[in-house]
Image (spheres, coloured by chain):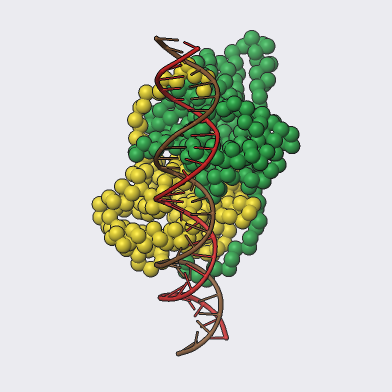
Chain colours: A yellow, B green, C red, D brown
Amino acid sequence: MYSSHLAPSGHHVPFAALGLTPKTTTLEGLFSAQPAETFTAGQAVFWEGDASTHVVQVVEGCLRLYRILPDGRRAVIGFTFGGEVLGVSFQGPYLYTAEAVTPVRLRRISRKRMIEVAATSSGTLRQQLMDKMYEEMSAAQHLIIVLGQLSAEERVANFLVAAAQRTGADRRKPVAVELPMSRLDIADYLGLTIETVCRVFSKLKREGLIALEGRHQVILRGIAALLDLAGEMDEDRPCGIRVPARPEAALPN
Amino acid sequence: MYSSHLAPSGHHVPFAALGLTPKTTTLEGLFSAQPAETFTAGQAVFWEGDASTHVVQVVEGCLRLYRILPDGRRAVIGFTFGGEVLGVSFQGPYLYTAEAVTPVRLRRISRKRMIEVAATSSGTLRQQLMDKMYEEMSAAQHLIIVLGQLSAEERVANFLVAAAQRTGADRRKPVAVELPMSRLDIADYLGLTIETVCRVFSKLKREGLIALEGRHQVILRGIAALLDLAGEMDEDRPCGIRVPARPEAALPN
DNA sequence: ACAGCCCTGTAACGAATTGTAACAGGACCT
DNA sequence: AGGTCCTGTTACAATTCGTTACAGGGCTGT
């Protein structure tokens, strides 16, 4: 989401040309050697609390990541789309359940193997893993701010803009965004109710900022306005106003 | 915040006894070779957006970690206390500003050095770094759930229980917890206002669950009840009710 | 000691969000 | 085609939380 160290392949050529097993010095190399597995919508890929035995790369489709609270509430932590990698940072049990929203194709590598390879290979793979973790961390902290500080409208605007960005579409012109997940998924992700999500969608539609094409497609018309609504929290755009620390130094506070 | 992998020191003894340079195979060893720096309350250790040049271990005191939003709102991401390590997962710029709440003593290691050592040393240090990242990730996701799903009262209960746990105090008996940060810090951390935090504190006090000793100390009387209020979200206690995926498989959803 | 300031606590009010309920629309089944 | 189920939408009532205002307490500096 932040950097593009995950170079769009094109790096494996030498090894492929030699007709050898795919090189194991990049994440792509490792994953591409694995068979693709298929999951139907609603099927779980792994469960919260299970030993994190694998690292997953989604090839195609959409996963929702969530936890269930003791009282039954559900917190959706995130969504994973094709081309994205999942669960790199898990030294302990999986922190969430991953479930297919749409039919999904994915590849898995055992964590054990990943660690072995990372320990022996050159620094490239290690670097990629670290980058992935940083991305995961960035995404988590972004969500923390969305949930902690933003209003319902701001949250939805953020969600839409983030979805648009994920597709790599450029700003400034209307973009059609696929939202394969249900309104409930979105609500549980944004810490809102399904009704609030609907209401905000309707409001944005009335204001001409978006258009709804069926349940799973939204067309963003006023991206600039949406970005504005989103508090421009979309990108890593630190508003690093270096407020000189208020001189409370002497306080025991 | 979750586990206590950071054993409360007592590990360096052998090497120190030999009078050798501190071993570089553990985090503790690396840090203990660094001089302790001092920060006064309110002073920043690093700024959001800066290149993340160092990894920090807080020796004593309390840091608050926060980001400022474009419109001036402040989101406190977390607090770091003595014995805890900070910013392990930063491959890119710092994601937040770290500022001393109380006077702080800390040690720093340059990230460059950390990477070099991790690359050459045995797996121990790498393992420790990964564990730290997993902890950071766990903490972030815990906060996501607190901010996204819990009510004001549940959030405060959670905060108190987490603070108690951090001290390593055992449940079941009253614990005195130091809260060096201000009410505003707590409010910005929990996504509430200062007044709401106060109200909930008052309510918990009325109900006899806590007692307030001055502004910076809380005595938890009914930890069981607080845990209950907190939704028992305190520990990594996954309520992994393996709900068999609702058979929406056939849906295009 | 006193004034002044900041942080904190309390209460009344209002706004934002949520819950409830009723209805519309599409997908699937028979 | 008709019926049923599920998702999504809208309106209205209920609740939570934020806003505003003000009072108390501790620390600072004169």
| Quadrant, the N terminus of chain B | top right
Q: Residue A40 is drawn in which quadrant?
A: bottom right
Q: Nearer the viewer, residue B14 or A185?
A: A185
Q: Residue sitting at 63 percent across and 54 percent down?
A: A71
Residue B107 visible within the image: no
Count of labels shown? 0
Task: Identify the residue shown where x is 52% and y is 53%.
Answer: A76
Please tell me which residue lies in front, B68 or A60.
B68
- Residue B230 place in picture, x, y as percent: 62, 44
| Residue at point 63%, 63% (across, down) | B244
Q: Which residue lies furthest to the right in this view?
A: B172
Foreground residue, C9 or A196? C9
Q: Tell me where residue B39 appears, x and y as whole percent.
A: 48, 18
Image coordinates of residue A59 in percent, x first then y, are 46, 56
Please tell me which residue is depicted at 29% across the width and 59% down the height of the picture: A207
The percent coordinates of residue B248 (x first, y second) are: 54, 68
- The answer to whether residue A173 is left or right of residue B215 is left
Instruction: Name the quadrant containing residue B221.
Output: top right
Residue furthest to the left in view is A172
Does the image show residue B202? yes
